[in-house]
Each structure stands twice: as structure tokens, then as C-alpha cells.
Image (cartoon, helix red, strand yellow):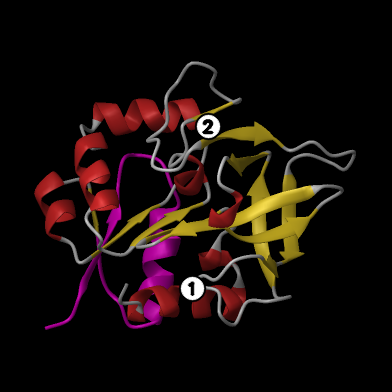
């Protein structure tokens, strides 16, 4: 029986481009905001585009926080993408006082650089710590669009960084939970390789 991957729909995120990319790599994928469907998934993806505070409000409105917390602690493969990565932290400078999901300790901070913000376009990855999804990604270019980045308390969860007048956290991971700041679905062959690795990954 094929594994079922569910992309969480909470009214924000580039769901269809992520869905299309996963179908291309052969995943059995569904987009859903139904808690029972998310709970029954073999693998879970939390995408996100927009503002941190708005996303947390929508997760509450859709009553999805509890089922996401259970998925994060379940040991099943979980992937956060772009703002979906940032939501896994305790909070963000973008939305003071709004708690994040808090799976990872640390805050999301504005990128401190003299270069233009948002950090938008292609940038290359430097791997920092092992990730099951990034084995082929050292030095490869992926696509970013963001003004904030995660600053974890535990630096050992940083799996890759990139340079943009400063060091930016490009991805993080711990056990069955991996997350990327960039958009794999917009990152050509490299991104497809990352999504294929997620499809095949057995923590």
C-alpha cells in the first residue's frame, strides 16, 4: 500500500504548486484541512506564504494546532516549507506576542543585511548538519522569497545555510521533523530531488 502524504490546507500557502511537484515525484498526495485526514496521513507537509501572525490565526481558526502538534511528536515524516518552517519556532519578530508552534526552541528574526530585503531569488546552500533530504544539495542553488529567518537556540538543528550579506538559516531538522526556508517546488531539479527524498524517507 502506498504511503499517503497530506499537505495541510489552512487557507494560506502555495498548496497547488507543492501538490503538483509531489505528484511529479510519484507521491500519493492529498490537500486537506480535515483533522482526521491529517491524523491518518503517513507523511505531513506544512506549507506557508504570507505573514507569521496571519498564519497562526488561521491555524487556530481551522482548529489545526492540536493535530499538527500530534503529527510533530508522532515520529512520522513531517516537512515545513517556507513560512511553514518558521511556524515551527516559538515566535517571530514579524508578529510580537504571537506564539508559534514551539516545536523548535528559538525565534524568527528579520534578516540583518545591507542587501535588499526580501531575500528573493536563487542562492546556494552550504550544508551544516546531516539531513535525510539534503544529501545531494551541497552547493546547489534553490529559490528563496523571505524577509525573516529562523534563529534556533540549538545550532545543531541547522541543516543548511546560505549567505546574503549575512548567514541565513536555510533549513533545520531534528529526527522526523525537517523544514526548509526555501521553496523546493520552485527550485527546479534540486527541489524535486528534495521532495523525492521526502517521499522515500523512512525515519
Quarter of the image where the N terminus is located: bottom left
Would you call the spot at circle 1 few (<14 residues within 10 Å), some (14-19), or many (20 or more)?
many
Q: Nearer the viewer, residue 143 or 140?
A: 140
Left or right: 160 in relation to 46: right
Left or right: 199 in relation to 133: left
Examine the rendering and report whether any part of residue 179 can be seen. no
Which residue is identified by label 1? Answer: 133
Residue drawn at point x = 21 percent, y = 46 percent: 70
Q: Nearer the viewer, residue 22 or 200?
A: 200
Instruction: Please tell me whether residue 41 is drawn above or below residue 155 in the rendered image.
Output: below
Instruction: Please tell me whether residue 58 is drawn above or below residue 157 in the rendered image.
Output: above
The mark found on residue 51 in the picture is 2
Q: Foreground mark, 1 or 2? A: 1
Left or right: 153 in relation to 11: right
Would you call the spot at circle 2 few (<14 residues within 10 Å), some (14-19), or many (20 or more)?
some
Secondary structure, mark 1, is loop
The mark found on residue 181 in the picture is none
Instruction: Please tell me whether residue 109 is drawn above or below residue 29 in the rendered image.
Output: above
Residue drawn at point x = 17 percent, y = 81 percent: 2
Q: Quadrant of residue 12?
A: top left
Instruction: Give the residues in magenta.
Output: 1-30
Left or right: 92 in relation to 8: right
Amino acid at each position: 500500500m502506498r504511503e499517503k502524504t497530506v499537505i495541510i490546507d489552512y487557507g494560506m500557502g502555495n498548496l497547488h504548486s507543492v501538490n503538483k511537484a509531489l505528484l511529479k515525484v510519484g507521491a500519493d498526495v492529498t490537500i486537506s484541512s480535515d483533522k482526521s485526514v491529517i491524523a491518518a496521513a503517513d507523511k505531513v507537509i506544512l506549507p506557508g506564504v504570507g505573514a507569521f501572525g496571519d498564519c497562526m490565526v488561521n491555524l487556530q481558526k481551522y482548529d489545526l494546532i492540536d493535530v499538527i502538534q500530534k503529527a510533530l511528536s508522532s515520529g512520522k515524516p513531517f516537512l515545513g516549507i517556507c513560512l511553514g518552517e518558521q511556524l515551527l519556532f516559538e515566535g517571530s519578530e514579524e508578529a510580537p506576542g504571537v506564539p508559534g508552534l514551539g516545536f523548535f526552541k528559538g525565534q524568527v528574526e528579520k534578516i540583518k543585511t545591507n542587501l535588499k530585503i526580501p531575500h528573493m531569488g536563487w542562492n546556494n546552500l552550504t550544508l551544516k548538519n546531516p539531513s535525510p533530504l539534503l544529501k545531494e544539495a551541497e552547493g546547489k542553488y534553490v529559490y528563496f522569497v523571505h524577509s525573516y529567518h529562523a534563529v534556533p537556540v540549538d545550532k545543531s538543528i541547522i541543516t543548511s545555510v546560505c549567505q546574503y550579506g549575512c548567514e541565513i538559516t536555510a533549513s533545520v531538522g531534528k529526527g522526523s521533523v525537517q523544514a526548509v526556508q526555501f521553496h523546493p517546488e520552485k527550485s527546479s531539479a534540486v527541489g524535486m530531488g528534495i521532495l523525492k527524498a521526502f517521499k522515500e524517507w523512512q525515519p
